[in-house]
Image: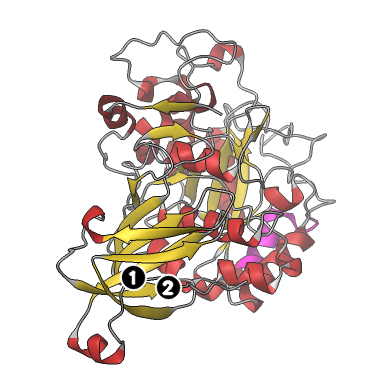
Amino acid sequence: MRSTLFSPILVSLLSSPFTQALQLESTNEGRLPAMGFNSWNCFNEHINEEKFLTAAQQLVDLGLKDLGYTYVNIDDGWSDKELWRDPETKRIIVDTKKFPDGISGLADKVHGLGLKLGIYSDRGTKTCASYPGSMDYEDIDAKTFSDWGVDYLKYDNCFIPDDEEDEYPWAPEWWNTTHDGNKIHAPESYDFSTSRSAQRYRAMRDALKKQDRIIQFGMCNWGHAHVEQWGNVTAQSWRIWGDILPQWTGHKDYIAWGVMPILNHALFHLSQTNFWGHADMDMLEVGNGLTPAEDRSHFALWAILKSPLLIGTPLDKISPETLAVFKNKELIAFNQDEEFGGPAWPYKWGVNPDWTWNQTHPAEYYSGNSTAGLHVFMLNTLEEKVTKTVVFDEVPGLDSTKRYTVHDMWTGEDIGIYEKEFSTPVESHDIAALRFNEASKDTEEALKVQGSRDQQLQRPL
């Protein structure tokens, strides 16, 4: 665990000003965070057509499609590891044992359900699971994906040849050193958008833009080469760190991380997220072994920071409790808000001083606006239940001289009318999700004015 108190200067560097994001022409695709299903967290490379058709049908049958979950994304493992590419056309060959109707056949079936199909490739010579990558085949692969009817491309970062490695490598898991502990010596004025990483991702971006079909572009370069500086002019989303694990804290070999470490890192890279460009905190692990409270916090935090919401658990085996988390209409509405594109921001850290880099106890207090009102989220990173308090004077946008109707986003019910502050118990690793609206005469009559004393929030368990 690393714990460092950042200076305001460093904070401003890490949260650089928003730059114009990449807009797909004549469409709203990519304007809001992508929502849907991705295969990696539940199946890894062990995939086939049947699993995707099952996932697609479940998105429809469970009511998830109607809430915005429309992408069915194939991850690594769809191509033929032996045949590789067609010797004449150079197109990637599909593994027909896994996909007997090819990717185009699967796309037709997915589109027939009113959904969209995503696919996976890599900027290197091979994918992370050693299937063919797209390096030097960007135009061919983009045309192939378009011809197949693909709507989304996840583009990974494995097997990069030595001569394609960045001159000044930078990875967030090493912070300001290389993996062997050597300091990075990039000049202070160095522009990471000129890095080889950025150039290769732009090559695929440009290849996709040449196609007649709109294909949303999701970069998966794990936060390398300071992608936050150039990601939103290259793709509709960009991964900010390594892979996610279904655990609360900790990491695995510095390539996969728990929910809290990823959240901690994301908090220092919020300013680039807005319409058309979203910092990707990785696919959801909700339903894959976290506690019910952790599932709620994981989903809520990804939603309020405007990360893509890609389900990563088998939908045909989903529990009612897990499904209820995915179907929370109010958190989805915050994530998909048509008027407010920016994420919620931490207004107070809680356990640690503000702007402390800490992978166990990141910021616990957040606020953000939506078309429905002003929202406050209070995370409990501790191992026991605690009482959390919204102090109106501390929250940007709240006025301590006014009364507010406090609404519970988990239950969908108004709690009461409060002034100056509101307190509630929050279970270990859980999160309170609240909406504040200035009280009107109508709400004054409908709800008895209450003080902020021991109000218990009810949660779906």
Which is the main secondary structure of the residues drawn in magenta?
helix
Region in magenta: 99-110
Residue 293 on the magenta segment:
no
Residue 317 percent across, percent down from the top left:
76, 67
Picture layout, residue 182 above or below residue 460? above
Which one is in front, 167 or 321?
Answer: 321
Name the residue that disc number 2 marks.
455
| Nearer to us in this view, 27 or 168 | 168
Is 459 placed left or right of 398 in the picture? right
Which image quarter: residue 20?
top left
Q: Amino acid at mark 2?
A: Gln
Q: Quadrant of residue 356?
A: top left
Q: Which residue is mark 1?
A: 452
Disc 2, disc 1: CB below 8 Å?
Answer: yes
**Secondary structure under the numbered disc 1 in the rendered image:** loop
Secondary element under disc 2, as helix, strand or loop, is loop
User: Is residue 425 visible in the rendered structure shown here?
Assistant: yes
